[in-house]
Image (cartoon, rainbow, N blue to C red):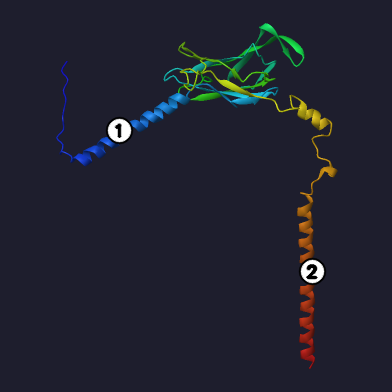
């Protein structure tokens, strides 16, 4: 097969013009590359929020984008930690999808809030009920769970996800970052922050029940009294002005009547 090339005639450019054109062409090529690179870097399964307080019950949302050009995502599975487990996991319904929380024996019993736990939620899996509910190319879907209590004594929790496509492809988002470089298929990660002193699951409810959540009148620092005092003072000045105005009007009318009688 013969390949034909056609070279159009061009007017030679002066060196400065040629350099400017070369720079413009390079910038035009670089911009799409940057945009595509940013899109590729961000197109992976993520969890929001990315941090939760130890001992709390967190609402975690997994954002799952479809990265295939011609297949739909039909199933999503998130593996939960078993060495530092959540003791409770519940799911938010997603229309057109069926969710299943799988319990499993722990490798070793774990002490959680004074209770020995031998079994805990090991995974959550969502499956599309039909092709119409699946995540089509160019779309994404969010899957939300309530999980707790967030384990104490750890800095972060890896939550590997598995994404299954309608053409049989399975993508495992299970790689953990080492150093500053992000892996090709990073696992969603939840950072764990230390619990505030004296706080924990149910602490707020206990404080409200004990009356600690409502400030007592004797604890008022006066910040709420000052605006009331200023308002009252302003109202008083307004009344004084009104009375003064009425008195002045009365005197004016009296002078007018006296002049007419003369």
Q: Nearer the viewer, residue 218 or 76?
A: 218
Which residue does the image show at 79% across and 86% down from the upper left? 257
Which residue does the image show at 76% across and 82% down from the upper left? 252
**Which of disc 1 and disc 2 is earlier in sequence?**
1
* Mark seen at residue 26: 1
* Mark seen at residue 240: 2
Whether residue 236 is visible to the viewer of this picture, yes or no, is: yes
Q: Quadrant of the C terminus?
A: bottom right
Distance, label 2 to label 1, CA atoms, is: 77 Å
Relative to 216, say whether 150 is above or below. Answer: above
Q: Residue 120 vs residue 253: left or right?
A: left
| Percent position of residue 28, x then y | 32, 34
Mark 1 Cα-neighbour bin, 10 Å: few <14, some 14–19, many ≥20: few
Q: Nearer the viewer, residue 145 or 105?
A: 105
Relative to 232, say whether 34 is above or below. Answer: above
Q: Residue furthest bottom?
A: 262
Q: Residue 198 vs residue 176: left or right?
A: right
| Percent position of residue 32, x then y | 36, 31
Q: Which quarter of the figure has residue 215?
A: top right
Q: Residue 20 vs residue 41: left or right?
A: left
Label 2: element kind: helix
Q: Which quarter of the figure has residue 230?
A: bottom right
């Amino acid at each position: 097969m013969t390949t034909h090339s056609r070279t159009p005639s061009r007017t030679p450019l002066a060196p400065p013009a040629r350099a400017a054109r070369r720079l413009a062409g390079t910038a035009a090529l670089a911009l799409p590359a940057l945009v595509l690179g940013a899109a590729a870097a961000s197109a992976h399964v993520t969890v929001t929020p990315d941090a939760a307080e130890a001992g709390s019950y967190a609402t975690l949302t997994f954002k799952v984008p479809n990265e295939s050009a011609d297949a739909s995502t039909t199933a999503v599975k998130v593996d939960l930690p078993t060495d530092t487990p959540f003791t409770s996991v519940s799911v938010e319904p997603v229309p057109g999808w069926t969710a299943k929380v799988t319990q499993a024996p722990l490798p070793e019993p774990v002490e959680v809030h004074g209770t020995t736990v031998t079994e805990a939620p090991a995974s959550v899996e969502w499956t599309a009920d039909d092709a119409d509910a699946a995540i089509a190319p160019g779309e994404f879907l969010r899957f939300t769970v309530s999980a707790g209590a967030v384990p104490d004594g750890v800095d972060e929790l890896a939550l590997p996800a598995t994404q299954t496509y309608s053409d049989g492809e399975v993508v495992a988002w299970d790689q953990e970052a080492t150093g500053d470089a992000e892996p090709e298929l990073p696992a969603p990660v939840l950072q764990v922050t230390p619990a505030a002193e004296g706080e924990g699951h149910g602490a707020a409810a206990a404080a409200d029940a004990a009356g600690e959540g409502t400030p007592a009148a004797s604890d008022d620092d006066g910040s709420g009294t000052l605006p009331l005092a200023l308002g009252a003072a302003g109202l008083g000045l307004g009344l004084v002005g009104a009375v003064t105005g009425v008195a002045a009007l009365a005197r004016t009318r009296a002078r007018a009547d006296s002049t007419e009688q003369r």
